[in-house]
Image (spheres, helix red, strand yellow):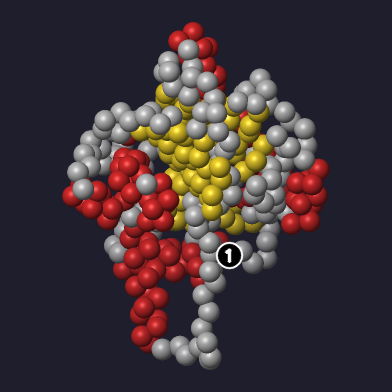
Amino acid sequence: MCGIAGIFRSEAWAAPEVASLQPVLAAMGDRMLHRGPDDGGTWIEAGAYVGLSHRRLSIVDLSAAGHQPMSSWDDRYIVAFNGEIYNFLELRPELEAGGARFRTRTDTEVLIEAVRAWGLETALERFDGMFAFALYDRHTHELMLARDPFGEKPLYTMMRAGELAFASELTALRELPWFDDTCDEDALAEYLCFQYIGAPRSLYRSVQKLPPGHYARIRPGEDLKITRYFAFHPYGVEGEAQLSEELVDELEEILCRSLRRRLISDVPLGAFLSGGVDSSTVAALATRKLGVPLRTYSIGFEGAPESEHLIARRFAEHLGTEHHERMVTPDASRFLHEAGRHLDEPNGDTSCLPTY
């Protein structure tokens, strides 16, 4: 988990403005320190139309080469990226064959070169991942924002005359002197009905979420254009479904292929283990089929007559994982305020507190 933020405007930044914008970008990044404690950086220069800020949580290529905002090898593109491109190792050789030059082992650099080679929309269609990013073209002065198909990574935007601000969290946007905290009553009503606020609304009238599966583009003097690039098509089977050994094997292969992509890491890997079918399946395939050592984590509730953490403990022993347990006690309510602060917006999911 990383954090991105930035400000785009219709007029290029002059040298004196760069000096004054730098601390604002740094402050926006500092508000997201918990998202990226390993590294942080900003990018702004005279003549540019955007300033970028980034907080990094290092997963792949822990070296300083993975510092962000990251530039392309020819300095044309600058990116601030939050998330992971799971199939980056599959895309990289194809890009290299097309002339791309890589200086790091990161998926961030694959993202930049994919957009360069194929264009934004084709690159997004080929990415398998969870992401939100801001990519700036120093030649055309175009800013591109994008969010993954299911909206796993957040991206908020806020506009006023001639300026667009964006960030992974509302807390970063609140650093701007022109932030308007007027509540969107329709969004509040939506939360009270559905226990969450769906995109494009946010709790504030002045702030919008970029919807999942969408990208946005803006150039100086032009309006922000938002485009949908992904549409979910439910899968159905005609007639009566027949369970067969062949289908079971096919499902196992699909799950293993998906997990293999997601378990590429230069740091130790962990998994939540609830004792249910889904998390147990993931942990079993990762350890037994793929041979990946896992640290597993379970939550229990003190005083509960039956707690899933006991089932999870037995399953962890069966798999031989390094297992960790945390108990939720009756005084856990003392964490409500702090947990709520990290949620950014109201959220009715009761698992938020024990997860925190």
Residue 200 as seen in the image, left or right of residue 49: right
Which three-letter amino acid code belongs to the residue tagged 1? Glu
Residue 350 as seen in the image, left or right of residue 80: right
What residue appears at the point 76 percent right and 52 percent down from the top-left corner? 190
Residue 327 as seen in the image, left or right of residue 70: right
What residue appears at the point 60 percent right and 26 percent down from the top-left corner? 162
Above-or-below relation of 291 to 110 = below
Above-or-below relation of 334 to 42 = below
Q: Nearer the viewer, residue 250 or 46?
A: 46
Image location (x, y in percent) of residue 21: 52, 16
Determine the secondary structure under disc 1: helix
Above-or-below relation of 284 to 80 = below
Based on the displayed image, in which of its 4 quarters is residue 350 positioned?
bottom right
Residue bearing the label numbered 1: 308
What residue appears at the point 19 percent right and 43 percent down from the top-left corner? 99
Above-or-below relation of 243 to 352 = below
Q: Nearer the viewer, residue 18 or 347?
A: 18
Quadrant containing the C terminus in the rendered view: top right
Q: Nearer the viewer, residue 265 or 49?
A: 49
Image location (x, y in percent) of residue 239: 53, 91
Mark 1 packing: few (<14 Cα in 10 Å), some, or many (20+)?
Answer: some
Q: Nearer the viewer, residue 171 or 92?
A: 92
Q: Residue furthest front?
A: 221
Image location (x, y in percent) of residue 78: 38, 31
Q: Is residue 272 visible?
A: yes
Image location (x, y in percent) of residue 234: 54, 72
Q: Is residue 111 visible?
A: no
